[in-house]
Image: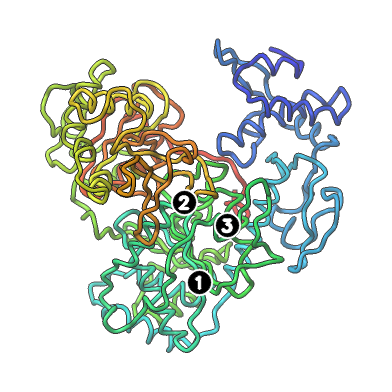
């Protein structure tokens, strides 16, 4: 084992920024502390790039910290936990949170210590601005980069405060508004959780709604907007609708515009509907090269209600900025799916917000739990429903979020016994459903489908068989894009099907699969061989470019411009119109017949083909597979070896943070 920090340069597994950060941090201390502190700094920096907000030193004490990329040989071992904590507590580079205070009280009940800040600028909310002089923070056994410790603490404090807020409305008025929107309460003893979510959104300043595709989140938003219209008809609230990406924002906008709400003929709720959803970056005024958005506690958003869709995609810094920019009176309504992939950047925020299922308003396998009898009685009064006694837990909630969290379980798109419904349920449970995945996988050229129903298919193709296996996909799907007579028709064909890969590199990755599709199209003379710019090429934008109005994740098509017959890149705007960009002005992009599952979040297709690699990699998790298959409305095909598939079902995303503890308490 190596002992000197200079050996970090030889590993090949650390990024340059990890090595430089570790050496810069260690240089602040005496020789006796440099190794322990430097290794901890390198580990915290590296794990942040893997999505961990912090490093829990209990996980690493006495264990190998890094591995050499070439040989996989272990290098550096974490110190015994007590020794490591002692060294960090003595370090001039580490701010040590008072061990006698809980993480919540260190933020909620006293100002941040002067030792951790370089200036004590008071915010309007009475809390000191945090400008760290020490790059690391040790909070219990969790080690943070200072900025992320502040994001986590500040977000927890703000959300707990918002969760405690009530809207001053008469219960009779809320019930009347709800009854104007919803059908009469049925007598089948089933709790209508969309109705409950609407009541929570009407009465509380915070409402968190989690549900999978088809559980009616968009319909619930329409109901919430209608109820707010009823309650505040004389002075309609200023409502903003946002999502993390342009794709997600466009989809929620279009879904709401097309929402066939049964109450629409009685309540003109769309008059109170925002014209379009915005990306959170645009809403907050995130500026390139600046850490602080335009909207902040000093310059809050001008709104009364903020509704954020696809909240599971939001990372910790963005969620912290969003909460900080809310005016004190505003409602915050977050919608997402706690079972989906976590954000690309650090954190598993939406899952942390949902907390433990038993601490929210849950209806799962008839085990609903409500933590307060007073709250249960209030819900009964405004919804007109009677909650069974089993819904009441009788234990005082540790978090105000327990009164704000609703889980939608009933799926209106996929009945429980439908193939897609069973597939999604089996993935969430981590189970290999032999009836869904009927029989054993096989290689081409045997005939699909592999499952009893065409909605779910499963097969396996070895590397040398991939081109042959993809040929029917190209002939049946992507040729239609290339042969479309109009741009709108081409977009329609592209939206009907997409290949989703778990990885970018390797024979089963996005790059290789896109190359195979283009080769197949060229062989059947649908596109020019070797061309990078051709009619019908789908492109995926890889970086934000505010000058041309394109953002990471936007998907467009290359198509001739009727004005000059030159190829342009065309993108659909949120209002349904088309936006053309000269090829010379396109930001970084790639072909998009296939895309990663991460990039597909916020999108929806009629059918998807999910391709998993032929070996175990860290990204293969239950959440990734669930996210992939739930992009499909009508059918999904999975190409995966049985061992890889079963292993993926067993692996759950683990991201270290203290947010769940700060919000919900407990271990």
Look at the image and tell me whether residue 429 can be seen.
Answer: no
Quick one: SS at disc 1?
Answer: loop
In the image, 631 versus 354, the foreground residue is: 631
Judge from the rendering whether residue 261 lies leftward or rightward of residue 666; answer left or right: left
Calculate the distance from the C-alpha at mark 3 to the C-alpha at mark 1. 15 Å
User: Which callout, 3 or 1, points to the residue nearer the camera?
Assistant: 3
Quarter of the figure with residue 93: top right
In the image, 284 versus 213, the foreground residue is: 284
Could you say where residue 128 lies in the image, as x and y percent from the top left?
79, 60
Q: How is the image coloured?
A: rainbow
Q: Which residue is mark 2?
A: 245
**Taking 313 as reference, is 388 above or below it?**
below
Q: Residue at x 65, y 59 (%)?
A: 294
Check disc 1: other Cα within 10 Å, few if <14, some if 14-19, many if 20+.
some
Q: Residue at x 60, y 52 (%)?
A: 661
Dot 1 or dot 2, earlier in sequence: 2
Could you say where residue 573 lies in the image, as x and y percent from the top left?
39, 56
Calculate the distance from the C-alpha at mark 1 to the C-alpha at mark 2. 37 Å
Q: Which residue is mark 1?
A: 372
Look at the image and tell me whether residue 215 can be seen.
Answer: yes
Could you say which disc has been placed on residue 664 in the image? Answer: 3
Quick one: SS at disc 3?
Answer: helix
In the image, 631 versus 667, the foreground residue is: 631
Extreme-front residue of the structure: 564
User: Which callout, 3 or 2, points to the residue nearer the camera?
Assistant: 2
Dot 3 or dot 1, earlier in sequence: 1
| Quadrant of the image containing the N terminus | top right
Could you say where residue 18 lies in the image, as x and y percent from the top left?
68, 28
Extreme-top residue of the structure: 71
């Amino acid at each position: 084992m190596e002992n000197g920090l200079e050996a970090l340069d030889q590993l090949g597994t650390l990024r340059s920024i990890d090595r430089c950060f570790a050496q810069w941090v260690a240089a602040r201390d005496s020789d006796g502390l440099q190794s322990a502190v430097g290794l901890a700094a390198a580990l915290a920096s590296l794990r942040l790039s893997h999505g961990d907000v912090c490093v829990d030193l209990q996980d690493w004490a006495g264990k190998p910290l890094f591995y050499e990329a070439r040989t996989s040989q272990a290098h550096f071992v974490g110190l015994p936990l007590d020794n490591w904590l002692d060294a960090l507590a003595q370090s001039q580079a580490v701010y040590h949170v008072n061990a006698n205070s809980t993480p919540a009280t260190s933020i909620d009940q006293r100002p941040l210590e002067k030792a951790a800040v370089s200036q004590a600028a008071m915010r309007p909310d009475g809390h000191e601005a945090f400008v760290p002089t020490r790059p690391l923070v040790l909070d219990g056994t969790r080690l943070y980069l200072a900025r992320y410790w502040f994001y986590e603490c500040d977000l927890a404090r703000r959300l707990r405060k918002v969760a405690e807020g009530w809207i001053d409305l008469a219960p009779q008025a809320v019930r009347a508004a709800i009854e104007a929107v919803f059908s009469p309460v049925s007598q089948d003893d089933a709790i209508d959780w969309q109705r409950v979510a609407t009541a929570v959104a009407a009465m509380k300043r915070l409402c968190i709604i989690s549900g999978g595709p088809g559980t009616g989140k968009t319909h619930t938003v329409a109901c919430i907007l209608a109820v707010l219209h009823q309650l505040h008809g004389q002075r309609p609230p200023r409502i903003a609708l946002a999502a993390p990406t342009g794709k997600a924002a466009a989809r929620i906008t279009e879904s709401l515009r097309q929402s066939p709400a049964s109450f629409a003929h009685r309540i003109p709720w769309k008059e109170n509907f925002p014209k379009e959803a915005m990306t959170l970056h645009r809403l907050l005024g995130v500026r390139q090269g600046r850490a602080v958005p335009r909207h902040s506690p000093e310059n809050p958003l001008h709104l009364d209600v903020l509704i954020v869709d696809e909240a599971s995609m939001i990372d910790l810094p963005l969620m912290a900025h969003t909460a900080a920019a809310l005016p004190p009176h505003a409602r915050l309504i977050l919608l997402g799916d706690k079972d989906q992939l976590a954000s690309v950047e650090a954190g598993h925020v939406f899952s942390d917000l949902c907390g433990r299922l038993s601490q929210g308003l849950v209806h799962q396998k008839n085990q609903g739990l409500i933590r307060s009898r007073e709250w249960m009685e209030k819900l009964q009064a405004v919804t007109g429903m009677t909650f069974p006694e089993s819904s009441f837990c009788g234990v005082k909630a540790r978090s105000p979020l327990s009164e704000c969290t609703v889980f939608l379980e009933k799926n209106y798109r996929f009945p429980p016994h439908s193939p897609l419904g069973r597939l999604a349920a089996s993935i969430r449970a981590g189970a290999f459903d032999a009836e869904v995945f009927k029989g054993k996988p096989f290689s081409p050229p045997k005939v699909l489908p592999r499952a009893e129903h065409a909605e779910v298919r499963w097969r396996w193709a070895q590397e040398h068989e991939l081109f042959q296996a993809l040929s029917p996909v190209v002939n049946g799907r992507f040729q239609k894009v290339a042969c479309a007579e109009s741009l709108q028709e081409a977009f329609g064909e592209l939206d009907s099907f997409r290949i989703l890969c778990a990885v970018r590199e390797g024979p089963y990755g996005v790059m290789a699969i896109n190359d195979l599709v283009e080769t197949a199209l060229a062989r059947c003379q649908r596109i020019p061989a070797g061309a990078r710019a051709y009619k019908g090429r789908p492109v995926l934008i890889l970086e934000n470019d505010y000058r041309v109005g394109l953002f990471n994740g936007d998907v467009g098509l290359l198509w001739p411009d009727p004005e000059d017959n030159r190829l342009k890149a065309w993108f659909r705007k949120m209002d349904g119109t088309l936006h053309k960009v000269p090829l010379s002005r396109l930001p970084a992009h790639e072909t998009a017949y296939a895309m990663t599952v991460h990039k597909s979040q916020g999108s929806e297709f009629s059918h998807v083909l999910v391709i998993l690699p032929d070996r175990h990699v860290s990204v293969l998790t239950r959440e990734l597979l669930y996210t992939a298959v739930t992009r499909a409305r009508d059918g999904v095909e999975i190409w995966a070896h049985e061992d890889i598939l079963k292993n993926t079902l067993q692996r759950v995303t683990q991201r270290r943070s203290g947010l769940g503890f700060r919000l919900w308490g407990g271990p």
